[in-house]
Amino acid sequence: MQSVLEQEVSRLWLRLRDWLRQRDRAVLFGVLLCAVPFLPVTFVGVVMTCINLLLLRAGKIPRQDLPLMVFGLAIAAFYVALWWVLFTFVVGSGLWYVPRQVLDFLLNLVPMRRHDFGIPV
């Protein structure tokens, strides 16, 4: 005999499965890519979602997928804003100097001359 919690979770999974089956796979995949917080993947998701919006406008995708696409674009906008803030923080704080300092340190450890790497002495 199943507990009440198991029954409710089972019903929830069945409703979610039915809801996902009613959606277009390309729309779901595009929104999923928009939700990845890695900027190149997010960009691919935005492109895919914009193509889906064009297909929606042409009437080839059901209108019920529009809120899902708008939600995906909102998530992507949030991630782009987050990356922009992080980038301005790194550039403004001087943390972008760190890779050059690490490179200088590693090149000083290597028993070669620095001008062999095209770095001025």
Image (tube, rainbow, N blue to C red):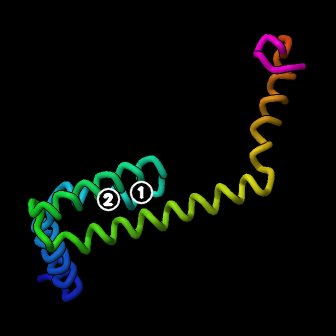
Q: Can you give x and y, in whole percent of width and height, for residue 64 in the image? A: 15, 74
Q: Secondary structure at mark 2?
A: helix
Q: Is residue 68 above or below residue 99?
A: below
Q: Is residue 120 magenta?
A: yes
Quick check: marks 2 and 1 in contact, CB under 8 Å? yes
Instruction: Return the mark for residue 32.
Output: 2
Give me the C-alpha separation between circle 2 and circle 1.
7 Å
Q: Is residue 7 left or right of residue 88?
A: left
Which span of residues is magenta-colored?
A: 115-121
Label 1 crowd bin: few (<14), some (14–19), many (20+), radius 10 Å: some
Residue at image position (27%, 67%) is 69
**Number of marks present in the image shown:** 2
Q: Is residue 67 above or below residue 95?
A: below
For the C terminus, which image quadrant?
A: top right
Q: Residue at x 76, y 15 (%)?
A: 117
Q: From what the image shows, is residue 97 above or below residue 46? A: above
Q: Is residue 35 in the magenta section?
A: no
Which residue is denoted by mark 1 in the rendering?
A: 36
Question: Element type at marker 1?
Answer: loop
* Amino acid type of the residue tagged 1 in the rendering: Val
